[in-house]
Image (tube, rainbow, N blue to C red):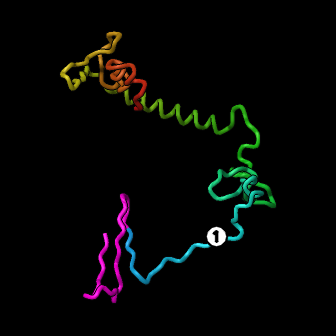
C-alpha cells in the first residue's frame, strides 16, 4: 500500500510515506531516512579453515572446550566440594527420617479421631460409583483420588497426577 503527497505536476516536493505490508508485519518507509548498512566484520569472515573449526562460534552448540572456567586459578566447578565422595548413609538422613516419623505420628493421631463415612462419586453421565473394583466401599479419609480413577479407568489412573 503506498501513499504519496505529490503536487499537481507529478513532482515529489514533499517526503513520501510508504507502508509495505507483508503477511506477518508491516514496515513504514519514509523517503530520506535510510537504515545503516551492515558491513561484515573482518574477524567473522568465513574462511574455509574456520569452517572446519566449529567450536565457540555463534549459533553453535556449546562444548566443554569453549569458554573460560568459572575460577581459573582454583579450578572449581559448580557445587564446589559438596559431593566429593559418596556416603552410604549420610548423617542428615537420620534427622530427616526422624522428622518424617514425627509428622506421620501426628497425622495418624488426627486420622484416628475422624470417623470414616461412606461417599459416592457421581459421573457426568449420571453413573454413581460407591465402591472399588474389589468391593471395598468408598469412605472419607480412606479413599484416595487414585482409587476413584482406578474404578473409572486404569489408564486414567496411570496418567493422572494427584
Q: Position of residue 84 (x, y in %)?
A: 76, 43
Residue lying at 69% horizontally and 50% vertically, measured from the top left: 79
Quarter where residue 74 is shown: bottom right
For disc 1, the neighbor class at 10 Å (few under 14, some 14 to 19, many from 20) is: few
Quarter where residue 22 is shown: bottom left
Residue lying farthest to the front in this orientation: 9
Residue lying at 47% horizontally and 30% vertically, measured from the top left: 105
Q: Which residue is mark 1?
A: 40
Q: Main secondary structure of the magenta part?
A: loop
Residue lying at 75% horizontally and 54% vertically, measured from the top left: 53
Q: Compare residues 97 and 3 and report the one nearer the observer.
A: 3
Q: Secondary structure at mark 1?
A: loop
Q: Compare residues 66 and 115 and report the one nearer the observer.
A: 66
Residue 158 part of the magenta-drawn span: no
Residue lying farthest to the left in this orientation: 126
Q: In the rendered structure, which segment of residues is drawn in magenta? A: 1-26
Residue lying at 21% horizontally and 19% vertically, measured from the top left: 127
Vertical side of 75 occupied by 143: above or below: above
Quarter where residue 134 is shown: top left
Say if residue 69 shows up in the picture: no
**Quarter that holds the C terminus:** top left
Say if residue 150 shows up in the picture: yes
Q: Relative to 17, is 72 on the left or the right?
A: right
Q: Relative to 104, is 73 on the left or the right?
A: right
Vertical side of 137 occupied by 79: above or below: below
Q: Position of residue 46 (x, y in %)?
A: 70, 61
Q: Relative to 108, is 87 on the left or the right?
A: right
Residue 18 part of the magenta-drawn span: yes
Amino acid at each position: 500500500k503506498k501513499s504519496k503527497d505529490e503536487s499537481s505536476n507529478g513532482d515529489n516536493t514533499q517526503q513520501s510515506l510508504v507502508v509495505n505490508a507483508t503477511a506477518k508485519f508491516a514496515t513504514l518507509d519514509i523517503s530520506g531516512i535510510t537504515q545503516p548498512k551492515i558491513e561484515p566484520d573482518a574477524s567473522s569472515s568465513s574462511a574455509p579453515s574456520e569452517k572446519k573449526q566449529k567450536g565457540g562460534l555463534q549459533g553453535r552448540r556449546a562444548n566443554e572446550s569453549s569458554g573460560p572456567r568459572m575460577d581459573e586459578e582454583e579450578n572449581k566447578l559448580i557445587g564446589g566440594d559438596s559431593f566429593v565422595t559418596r556416603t552410604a548413609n549420610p548423617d542428615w538422613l537420620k534427622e530427616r527420617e526422624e522428622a518424617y516419623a514425627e509428622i506421620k505420628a501426628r497425622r495418624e493421631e488426627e486420622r484416628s479421631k475422624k470417623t470414616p463415612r461412606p461417599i459416592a462419586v457421581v459421573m457426568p453421565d449420571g453413573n454413581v460409583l460407591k465402591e472399588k473394583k474389589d468391593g471395598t466401599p468408598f469412605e472419607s479419609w480412606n479413599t484416595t483420588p487414585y482409587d476413584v480413577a482406578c474404578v473409572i479407568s486404569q489408564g486414567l489412573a496411570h496418567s493422572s497426577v494427584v
